Amino acid sequence: MSKLICRCGNIIPDITDNLPYKGYIISDKELFKMYDFVDKLIETDSSPKERLTMTFRKNVRIGKKYIRLKEIYQCPNCGRILIETIPGEYSFFCPEENIENNLLDYDGEEKAEC
């Protein structure tokens, strides 16, 4: 994917990693499949850490692999949420109130308040 066009006309580029307006969502069913898969890897594989990591990454990704993650974007302009329905297709959701254009901009660190 290189870019999406929001209903407001804003172009949402996807040409690099660590984008503040992009994320992934996982269903509850898929989340527990992921937990089970991680448990299975830990219990059955005595391989080095790098091999475990690569096995996990090959099975947990976008597309039809073991566990399905869906892309999610938030338009920085209007706050709409775009959720992938099938690869390359998106549903649009418009916020009703409290428009915050940075819902996906989180890196595990608490933001300092001024």
Image (cartoon, grey):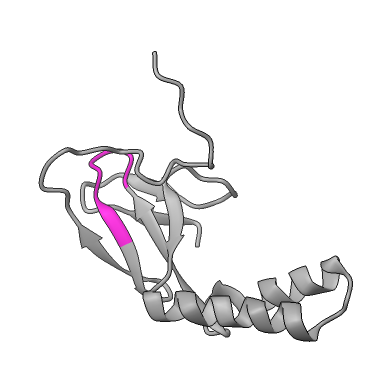
Boundaries of the magenta span: 75-82
Residue farthest front in this picture: 43
Q: What residue appears at the point 28 percent right and 52 percent down from the top-left corner? A: 6
Magenta highlight on residue 16? no
Q: What residue appears at the point 57 percent right and 46 percent down from the top-left corner? A: 18
Residue 89 image-quadrant placement: bottom left
Q: What residue appears at the point 51 percent right and 82 percent down from the top-left corner? A: 33
* x then y, percent, for residue 62: 53, 73
Residue farthest left in this picture: 96
**Figure disc tally:** 0
Q: Magenta-highlighted stretch: main secondary structure? A: loop
Residue 26 versus residue 74: which sits nearer the camera? Answer: 26
* x then y, percent, for residue 3: 44, 55
Q: What residue appears at the point 84 percent right and 67 percent down from the top-left corner? A: 50
* x then y, percent, for residue 39: 65, 79
Quadrant for the C terminus, please.
top left
